[in-house]
Structure formats: C-alpha cells, structure tokens
Amino acid sequence: MIFVTVGTHHDPFERLLGALGSLDPADLVVQHGTGPAPPGVSRAEAFMPFDAMLECFREADVVITHAGVGSILCARSEGHVPLVVPRRHDLGEHVDEHQAELTRALAARGGVVAVWETANLAAAGAAAPPRRAVGETPEPRLCPSVREALTGERHQPSEA
C-alpha cells in the first residue's frame, strides 16, 4: 500500500494529487485535504483523525507526502524514507518556500527522497528505499536539520 498525505493546509495540492494518476490507484490510500479525491483509489479522505493517519503510516509500504514536518516525522518514526513533494509558493501551494528548504536539508542527509518534478513520481516510488524496522532510524528523534533551524544549535554527535 502507498500512503499519500497532502497535510491540512487550506490551499489544495492539485499538483501532487494529479501526479497520482501515474500510480496504480488500487494501491493508494490518500489524504487529499481541500483538493479533489483522486478517482479509483483504494481509500480517499479529505482529512483523517491523527490515529487513522498513524495507522496508515504503519501499514504503508511507501509514503508520499508534502514537506510537512509532522508528516515527515511520522513517516520516519515508522521506518520510512518518505518521498517528499514540497508545496511551492510560486504555484500558490503555500505561503512561502519553507517546504522546499526543509526538503533540501533533509534530502542532503538521506532522510527523505525529494521529488521536485511530479512527472518523476512513479519512478521515485519504484526506486523508494526499503523501509527500516521501527527504531532503526539513524538520527535522533528531532533530526539535526530541524533542531538547528528551531534552536540555532548544531547537533554534536556523541563519541562512542
């Protein structure tokens, strides 16, 4: 199963939702926000309760998400290296470019797979990194890129 979430932002994310047509709809569970539900998918909900989303992260083989911190952290905590399609300000998908900035920082560390062009979504999904067992993620709970952005402090790796 492929779990797709666009988050709860009030602007629709039709660029990502439209790209789902390149994937097998029977494999998709989609949280589509204010955008239209993709046709023929296994399950589609505009907004899901948090516990239902956590269940989807747990059951998914692959996660495709916007670059929302909560969605990325939930996917990572369940062993996924999520495919991330950042919302873009220039396309009216968000208020600024923070999702692109976060995606660049996390992709540079291998924490996410950045999908900059939605035409590449099917290929990125086919090449998605294998899911790790829960608890085998190599970074601390709050990854250094996010910690640095929030606190200005750089993470100092512990010496073993």
Image (cartoon, rainbow, N blue to C red):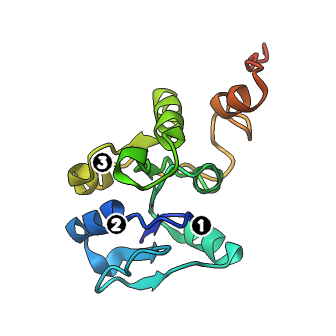
- Give the percent coordinates (x, y) of residue 35: 41, 74
Closest to the observer, 120 or 35: 35
What's the residue type where badge 1 is placed?
Arg
- Give the percent coordinates (x, y) of residue 151: 78, 27
Q: Which image quadrant for residue 98? A: top right
Q: Helix, strand, or loop for circle 2?
A: helix
Choose the circle earlier in sequence order: 3 or 1: 1
- Give the percent coordinates (x, y) of residue 57: 57, 65
Give the mark toward the camera: 1 or 2: 2
Q: Helix, strand, or loop for circle 3?
A: loop
Mark 2 lies on residue: 14
Q: Helix, strand, or loop for circle 1?
A: helix
Mark 1 lies on residue: 58
Q: Which image quadrant for residue 158? A: top right
Mark 3 lies on residue: 127
Q: Quadrant of the C terminus?
A: top right
Closest to the observer, 81 or 65: 65
- Can residue 140 be seen at all in this image of the molecule? yes
- Give the percent coordinates (x, y) of residue 133: 60, 52
- Rendered residue at 48%/50% (across/down): 82
Real-space CA distance between mark 1 and mark 2, rounded to the nearest whole angstrom:
25 Å
Q: Residues within 10 Å of mark 1 (few under 14, many from 20)?
A: some
Left or right, 23 with respect to 135, comes to: left
What's the residue type where badge 3 is placed?
Ala
Vertical relation: 10 (above or below) 97 = below
- Rendered residue at 43%/47% (across/down): 86
Vertical relation: 62 (above or below) 86 = below
